[in-house]
Image (cartoon, rainbow, N blue to C red):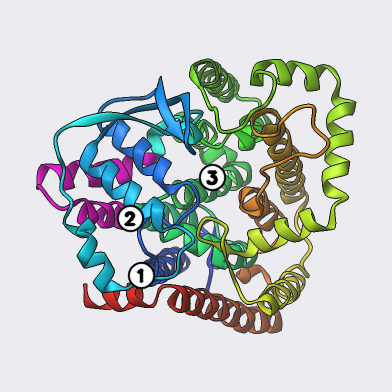
């Protein structure tokens, strides 16, 4: 399979690029659809809050309200909104199934959960984990819930439609990304990891946000390589995509530096203005969201804004806590395994030996596809993406320190490996060369290795899910 390159001229090369982009996007669409057959509803981390946020978007809610809630048996004030009681009953049933063995088809039928319908009545329910996010990227799930409600589908069918819409949105975004710039072998390998595929196959936010991140990275490389061919409209659309991504993924805030990097390369004032507007719009959203958020799940001891001021004023304290966190072998093991894949709500690991095997084969794959000397202009883009990726990793720890870690802190809590996925994508695009730039034998070896890697990840993921949820797989085949 030829990755192609859009900067090459000629109808043949351009047509090959389009076919390659469509092929890879279709492959991930097929894999995510297959994986979704093995996953019961709402098994992605915090997916219940994500579905609530998508439903609230259908009601025009952009900033969550604060109301009386019951979280883990405690009466608290939390950010949330008015949720249809039929939908809430469906969510609460599946919340009760988390961590339990597969109950089987008979139990699901007896419970009547699959026959629950939209009630037309609403009650306040919390969704504090999503309160910082601007909800634009929930649009696919929200559209599906609107259709389900208007057509009077069951909640279960509406949820399945939301999952399908999210998967298709990932397909569309990846197709655009692969057309904008040749995808690197490393990025394809990352997208095939069990955790990435599991999230892509859910109705959660990760799949869509990861796919949009690929679009934003590809557009940066395209603009950087062909700055004179980028119109103001295209640059503005890219900045809007960055805003939509970062406003729901705060740890990617350093990506706001990319438009300014392009400006220093092109010296176009319109691009500088677009970058400044994007930065200000992002800051404005977080200022409003943080001020309106009430999240009682983590007892911080101080407000988030106060903690930010403390650690910004004394950065040495942050780096001491970072070192203490990374000095723990248990933490590093958890980050490593949860990056590759700890499924469900972090209660369903893969077989132990697969983590080492996937890591080792991934490293070999990276080395094989890295033997090429980039052009000087490409080096600037590489180091820019590398700097942004490293800053994003640091911001993951800082964000969890000020929003999730009880104080006074001795270690940063709440960090998961999947939070490093987009920084890893940036590094893959920066240092992994498109396949057409490799030598003949590198292309053959890397191609065989990539196909083997994708096949192995798919088999491990589906077999793990089928063993845990056998009746879900059987029901999925009968749909």
Identify which residue, 73 or 460, lies in the foreground: 73
Residue 162 covered by magenta stretch: yes
Q: Which mark is residue 377?
A: none
* Residue found at x 18% / y 51%: 116
Q: Main secondary structure of the magenta part?
A: helix
Q: How busy is the neighbourhood of tag 1: few (under 14 within 10 Å), some, or many (20 plus)?
A: few
CB within 8 Å, label 2 to label 1: no
Q: Which is more foreground, mark 1 or mark 3?
A: 1
Identify which residue, 346 or 223, lies in the foreground: 346
Residue that numbered label 2 is attached to: 163
Rendered-image quadrant of the C terminus: bottom left
Circle nearer the N terminus (2, 3)? 2
Q: Position of residue 279 (x, y in %)?
A: 58, 22
Q: How busy is the neighbourhood of tag 3: few (under 14 within 10 Å), some, or many (20 plus)?
A: many
* Residue found at x 46% / y 55%: 44
Quote the CA–CA distance across marks 1 and 3. Answer: 45 Å
Identify which residue, 177 or 27, lies in the foreground: 27
Quote the CA–CA distance across marks 2 and 3. Answer: 27 Å
Q: Position of residue 389 (x, y in %)?
A: 71, 44
- Give left or right: position of 153 versus 94: left
| Quadrant hosting residue 35 | bottom left
* Residue found at x 56% / y 33%: 297
Q: Find the residue positioned furthest to the left.
A: 151
Q: Secondary structure at mark 2?
A: helix
Q: Which mark is residue 219?
A: 3
Q: Secondary structure at mark 3?
A: helix
Q: Which mark is residue 103?
A: 1
Q: Taking the image as drawn, is residue 244 in sight?
A: no
Residue 441 covered by magenta stretch: no
């Amino acid at each position: 399979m030829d990755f192609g390159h859009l900067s090459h001229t000629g109808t043949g090369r351009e047509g090959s690029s389009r076919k390659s982009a469509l092929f890879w996007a279709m492959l991930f669409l097929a894999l995510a659809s297959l994986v979704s057959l093995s996953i019961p509803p709402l098994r992605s981390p915090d997916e219940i809050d994500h579905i609530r946020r998508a439903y609230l978007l259908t009601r025009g809610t952009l900033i969550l309200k604060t109301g009386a809630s019951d979280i883990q048996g405690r009466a608290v004030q939390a950010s949330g909104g008015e949720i249809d009681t039929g939908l809430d009953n469906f969510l609460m049933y599946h919340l009760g199934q988390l961590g339990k063995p597969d109950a089987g088809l008979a139990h699901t039928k007896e419970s009547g959960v699959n026959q629950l319908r939209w009630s037309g009545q609403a009650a306040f329910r919390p969704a504090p984990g999503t309160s910082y996010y601007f909800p634009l990227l929930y649009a696919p799930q929200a559209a599906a819930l609107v259709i389900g409600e208007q057509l009077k589908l069951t909640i279960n069918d509406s949820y399945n439609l939301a999952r399908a819409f999210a998967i298709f949105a990932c397909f569309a975004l990846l197709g655009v990304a692969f057309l904008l710039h040749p995808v690197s072998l490393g990025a394809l390998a990352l997208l095939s990891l069990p955790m990435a595929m599991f999230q892509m196959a859910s109705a959660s936010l990760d799949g869509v946000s990861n796919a949009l991140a690929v679009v934003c990275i590809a557009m940066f490389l395209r603009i950087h390589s062909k700055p004179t061919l980028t119109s103001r409209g295209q640059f503005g659309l890219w900045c809007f995509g960055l805003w939509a991504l970062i406003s729901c993924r705060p740890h990617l805030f350093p990506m706001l530096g990319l438009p300014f990097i392009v400006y220093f390369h092109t010296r176009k004032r319109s691009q500088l203005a677009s970058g400044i507007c994007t930065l200000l719009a992002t800051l404005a959203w977080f200022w409003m969201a943080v001020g309106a958020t009430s999240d009682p799940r983590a007892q911080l001891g101080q407000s988030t804004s106060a903690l930010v001021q403390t650690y910004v004023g004394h950065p040495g304290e942050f780096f001491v806590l970072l070192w203490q966190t990374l000095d723990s072998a248990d933490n590093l093991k958890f980050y490593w395994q949860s990056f590759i894949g700890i499924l469900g709500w972090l209660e369903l690991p893969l077989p132990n030996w697969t983590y080492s095997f996937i890591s080792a084969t991934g490293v070999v794959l990276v080395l094989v596809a890295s033997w090429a000397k980039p052009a000087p202009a490409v080096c600037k883009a590489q180091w820019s993406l590398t700097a942004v990726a490293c800053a994003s990793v640091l911001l993951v720890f800082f964000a969890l320190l000020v929003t999730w870690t009880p104080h006074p802190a001795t270690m940063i809590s709440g960090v998961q490996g999947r939070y490093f996925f987009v920084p890893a994508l940036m590094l893959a695009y920066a240092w992994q060369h498109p396949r057409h730039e490799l030598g003949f034998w590198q292309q053959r070896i890397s191609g065989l290795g990539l196909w083997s890697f994708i096949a192995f990840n798919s088999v491990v993921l589906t077999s793990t899910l089928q063993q845990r949820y056998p009746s879900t797989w059987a029901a999925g085949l009968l749909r």
